[in-house]
Amino acid sequence: MGEETASRDPQPPTASPPDVILAVDVGARSFQVGLVTPKGVLIDRRTAAIEPDVGPESQYTALAGAITELMGEASVRHQVRVLGLGATCGGRVSRGLELVTPINVSSWRDFPLRHRLEELTELTVYGDLDAKGLALAEGWLGAAQGHPNFLALTVSAGVSAAIVLDGDLVDGETGHAGQIAHFVVEPGGRRCHCGTQGCLDAEASGAAIEEITGRPATEPSFQIMQRTGTLIGRAAASMCNVFDLSLVVVGGSVALGFGSTFFHAAQVALDDHARTPYSRGARITPSRLGEQGPLVGAGAVGWRGVRRAARQAR
């Protein structure tokens, strides 16, 4: 009787596994994949090299392999539930990363990234520009915590930017609000892929630096680091003047790799050109999240999408 009674005792309910976002970033030299918690903690990650001179499907296969491996680890090793996928990418992209043409993945031209990720993972995919992911991440956990108005900049293979005003990330008509890649910083300068000359992207991006110097952006001269910082600071000053901003947060492999030489030159240029009463004293600072920034940013894009979807479903 005792054994029978015991067998009928109600069992405690099994706790639901913690939720995470699968974060995907198309970076300067690699695809990155991670698991990001609701508190922005990156609990695991994988990388896959972006190989030069291979076709679009070979590039996607490398990314898909990293995603599949990490999704397996999510349930088995980490015992978490993946709620959705957040993705970030630079270059020419359409809203939600429906079609992407990254500078650093030469074989992807209008590649249907969102559809392919949804097909692979069977998750809802929330995608955005890399700088917008950086803005969300730095406002959440990084150098812009407590700042309702700031500019976020990525200086990597390309240059990208995003604006936060009154605590809200600004989207714009097509999701490109805040882009400064095509500010003309050198009139009559280098021809840009947009068709004009002297754009920031044509003068200060990693791809431009490689064309100017004949060497990868990982091997810069002092003059190149200084010049790149000056051009970025000049463009940032215009944004501070237009949007009444006092903080510029900069990430990306080029800016962070160039380090203090870049940031000193950028601050000097910002001081020289942001001279209105409201923009004077604006400062430029490195991303506090460092090399984790891109994946935390992609995770932030995913969490924002999941929470918006939940509110709309109520």
Image (tube, rainbow, N blue to C red):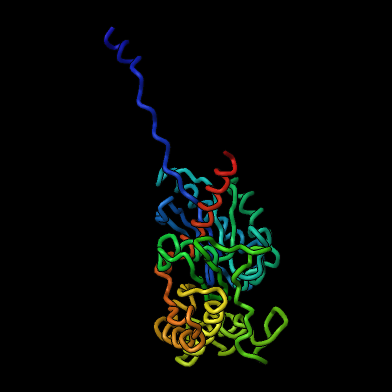
Residue at position x 62%, y 70% in the image:
91
Residue at position x 61%, y 77% in the image:
181
Where does the C terminus fall, quadrant-wise?
Answer: top right
Instruction: Please identify the quarter of the rendering in which residue 93 is found.
Output: bottom right
Depth check: give the residue in front, 222 or 104. Answer: 222
**In the image, residue 103 lies at what x, y percent?**
62, 73
Depth check: give the residue in front, 68 or 254. Answer: 254
Q: Please count the marks in the image.
A: 0
The relative height of residue 196 versus residue 176 in the rendered view (above or below) is: below
**In the image, residue 58 lies at what x, y percent?**
63, 63
In this image, 108 relative to 7: left or right? right
In this image, 194 relative to 244: left or right? right
Where does the N terminus fall, quadrant-wise?
Answer: top left
Can residue 165 be seen here? The reply is yes
Residue at position x 65%, y 91% in the image:
187
**In the image, residue 48 lies at what x, y percent?**
52, 63
The relative height of residue 41 versus residue 52 in the rendered view (above or below) is: above
